[in-house]
Amino acid sequence: QQQVKQSPQSLIVQKGGISIINCAYENTAFDYFPWYQQFPGKGPALLIAIRPDVSEKKEGRFTISFNKSAKQFSLHIMDSQPGDSATYFCAASGYGNKLVFGAGTILRVKS
Amino acid sequence: GAVVSQHPSRVICKSGTSVKIECRSLDFQATTMFWYRQFPKQSLMLMATSNEGSKATYEQGVEKDKFLINHASLTLSTLTVTSAHPEDSSFYICSVPGSGFGDTQYFGPGTRLTVL
């Protein structure tokens, strides 16, 4: 029940295209869902986060879509750029601030 | 968000030695910090929660006698890998809860530990 399942494992997108990464969770006690971006050899950086009381949140080119009934959420990167090439992790947390991470998605944006 | 630093960024040591990694919250006083471990091409795994003024709480399967955590002040937590072995080679990352949106955590740049 602590798992967060993330797909796909890797993704190749053309420059200007839309990158979509999906995550699913089981634990209904989770109430905070962030996405992190990580470049090789660096710590993860918070991209965007959402709570279950909203179905969508947009910040610049990044959008989280959240489906509470399906226990799924996804990250959409619009107008993907080569600089977006990185590993993306979804995560979830509940009481106590402990984050449970998905397995990660390696995104490559081809120019 | 919170600004977090780690020192050192890279360390290479011989098997059997101990290594100390520092995590500092530069602009935020943190009563709690988290320590994660990340193996190559894998996700982040929470090792322990560092609590200022009290003992750290460890996740299941993490040896508390091997990974010593000291939360000396509201801005500093240290992780000491004792009697390190090659299998302890990994990327160690700390995080600090932010004061803003809910359960946000801000991560340090990480420390690459290589045990020969």
Image (spheres, coloured by chain):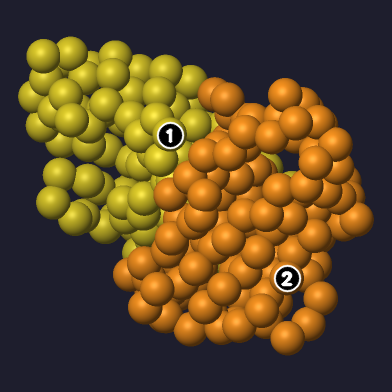
Chain colours: A yellow, B orange
Q: Quadrant of the C terminus of chain A?
A: top left
Please determine whether, in this image, residue B8 is positioned above or below residue A88: below
Instruction: Say which amino acid is labelled 2.
Output: Asn
Q: Residue at x 46, y 40 (%)?
A: A89
User: In this orientation, does residue B59 appear?
Assistant: no
In percent of width and height, residue B69 lies at: 75, 64
Q: Left or right: A85 with respect to B65?
A: left
Query: Badge 2 is on which residue?
Result: B70
Mark 2, Cα crowd under 10 Å, few <14 / some 14-19 / many 20+, is: some
Q: Residue at x 40, y 30 (%)?
A: A40
| Disc assigned to residue B74 | none
| Chain name for mark 2 | B
Quadrant housing residue B38 = top right
SS of the residue at dot 2? Answer: strand
Mark 1, Cα crowd under 10 Å, few <14 / some 14-19 / many 20+, is: few
Q: Residue at x 49, y 32 (%)?
A: A104
Instruction: Say which amino acid is labelled 1.
Output: Gly
